[in-house]
Amino acid sequence: MMSPDFIRLAILGNKSALGRLSAIFAGIALGTAMILLLVGAYEGLSTREIRSAWIKPVGETVPRESIAGGATAVLDGLQDWYRGSAIARIDVYTPHGTPVTLPGIPAWPAAETFYASPALARLIAEVPPDLLGDRFGTLAGTIDPETLKGPDVLAVIVGQPLERMLPRGGLIAAATAKGGADTESIAYRVVAAIGAIGMLSPVLLFVVIATRLGAASRRETFSALRLIGATPRQVSLVAGAETLAVSTAGAVAGIALAALFRPLAALFPINGAAFFPTDLDVGPVPTLLIAAGIVAAATLVSALAIRFSGIGPLGASRSMAERPARWWRILPLLAGLGMILAANPQLELVPGILIGVLLLGGFAMVTAGIVLIGPWLTAWLGRLVAVTASGPAGIIVANRIAQAPVATFRAVSGLVIAVFMVTVFSAASSGVASRTNVAELPNRLPANALVAAIAANSPVPIDVPGAREIIVGYGGVASATAQAPIFTGAELRKLGVIDAALDDAGRYRVRLEGLRDVTGTVPLGVTPVDTAQTGAPVTLVALAADTGEALERARTALEAGTDWITIPATRAELNLLGVNRILKELAVVAYTGAFITIIIAGCSLSLATLGSIIDRKRIFGLMRLMGTPQPTLDRVVFLEAAVPLSAVLALSAVAGYLTAWLILRVITDSLTVGAPDLLYFAFLALGLAVALAILQLARRAVRGGDGDLATRFD
């Protein structure tokens, strides 16, 4: 049994207790808050997709012949646009008295009226009608916010007359309409889980390093307790009890921090919308389980760190050499990369249900592998330093690495993981940029040209406000998936086709893939034809003016003035659909996470460096008593951080790029990584600046290493 006086002496018996306990408290609080927010975001993605699934309706399709009499209520799920922002749109025709089957509205909108989400209703009120509001008609009310993904969702349900709906294909019977499965949400959850692992890793390292700092600062106190008769088990229990109390308080503070920052975290747009703060609420039971798990892990780490640290009575406590770092440490990294490679659906190595498991498990193993392989590479570089060292600082560092490669690498492990994560984020973002930056090349349609398929009997507008040129191609566009239309040679030149063989008066069919290509990599491709096929459905291309307002005026005029089959959109906008939009949004969040990772890594480096100095203050004190110059000790501290960083930094960056490439190949085979952008180097410079600033502070701590207290027994 341990008396209260014994515990009080062990925990609060020195002046450094407050700072040490504060560091552990802060680490636990930050880790708990981050984990709760990440788990909340992961679960919130699923919750909001379920309640807002109706916005992508699916159901029984109805042939045109069945609705021509006007007795069947039908709807059409669409994607509209305003200044690069997507508007989820449902056009509906309903006979009088049709019961409502969509949530969020009290009744079907009559023809030329609409229900809008609160965010869209505010936007319509703020901008001139010819930019947006004239597309939909008269506002009948707002959609219930509790049925939407988030507070900033742009959504609209538009009532249409029957004649405007008939030309379209694939109309859904309103009576059978229900929410469709959101495959994008699955991709978001997978990538969000990868981001959670990426941000969680440095947080956990921070918690472990903060706990070890406490063990280092208490070495002398625990040695004194061993001298007066305390057993190793009692000392371990004291350390565990201390960490249990502090981590419990930190976990409670972390829960409060998560609640405090939940509204801010909810502002990040994921899958086209920000969150409602309640979406990120994990719930009381999971919150308690997560907090209890963190407290238990921190307590166990602290107790084991003291139990196996070799602390004996004063005068007998010395540093213990670690086990040599072996080659097997490379295996987890290789296994993780192999798991991500095996998850590629193109290879068909595993069932589809295991792809997500392999992807997440592989990423977690690669992250852990970077940490595990660090000491092995550090030990190898330490041998090289020992051979090439020409001064006392290099010799001291080489011996330190040979004796304790794990402890030496632990100091910079947070920064190494930060570089790995930033590289993954940057490489993934470079893949996004290669798709979202629409190429402006010869023989490609201009990126801001509006393209729409128009019904055969619809009037073709000649003067559209906001358009500097209207080009009409006739024939073969009876539906959204039919063949491409026919243009004259003169019109093709206006569309960007450069071909000396073009006859201005001749007629040419254009490949549909060229008109709708979102990346600008597919040329328009023309084939001469003999007939104009006038009177058939048409494809209308509006070359808008350069300003955003001009493009929106042209779009509004086309939507309001024609019976369109496909809604007017540019290929730059279509490029934001699907996986491109997913990754572009996540790139913003990823760089935010990278910034947080750099800051946490800096805190880990500061704590680890301080812990290393505290752990070896007797050694530094003896060196100062023997006449070692202070600049030599300064170089020792600097080299002990520089050597492991040099050993693993390049590998961390290469592994990050390789991991990002493998992940992108799993998500889609049309994305690949590109060259790092300036933001990547800015983050690396930030990490280097943080490391240099912390090492400068560590030099000041070393300058206090000549104290007689540390060496009085020698």
Image: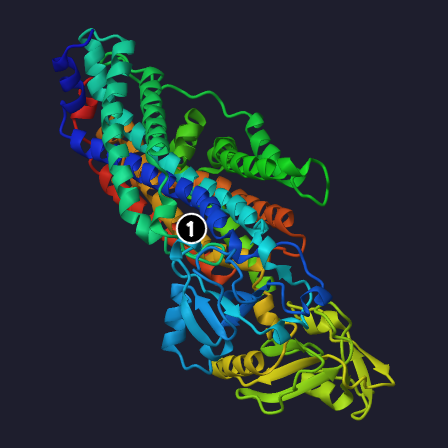
Residue 93 placement, left or right of 248:
right
Q: Amino acid at mark 1?
A: Ala
Q: Which residue is mark 1?
A: 594
Q: Nearer the viewer, residue 108 or 701?
A: 108
Residue 401 falls in image quadrant? top left
List x then y, in percent, for residue 176: 60, 53
Q: Nearer the viewer, residue 181 or 226?
A: 181
Relative vertical location of residue 644 with respect to residue 271 in this rendering, above or below: above
Q: Residue at x 61, y 49 (%)?
A: 667
Q: Nearer the viewer, residue 150 or 644?
A: 150
Residue 654 placement, left or right of 693:
right
Residue 236 falls in image quadrant? top left
- Secondary structure, mark 1, is helix
List x then y, in percent, for residue 541: 65, 81
List x then y, in percent, for residue 433: 56, 62
- Considering every residue shown, the one lying at the far right of the view is 530
List x then y, in percent, for residue 599: 34, 47
Q: How is the image coloured?
A: rainbow
10 Å neighbourhood of mark 1: few (<14), some, or many (≥20)? Answer: many
Relative vertical location of residue 79 with respect to residue 208 in this rendering, above or below: below
**Residue 619 visible in the current orientation:** no
Give the quadrant of the C terminus: top left
**Residue 29 visible in the current orientation:** yes
Q: Residue at x 41, y 50 (%)?
A: 593
Relative vertical location of residue 414 with respect to residue 522 in this rendering, above or below: above
Residue 5 placement, left or right of 411:
left
Give the quadrant of the N terminus: top left
- Disc tally is 1
Relative vertical location of residue 86 with respect to residue 507 in this rendering, above or below: above
Residue 21 placement, left or right of 444:
left
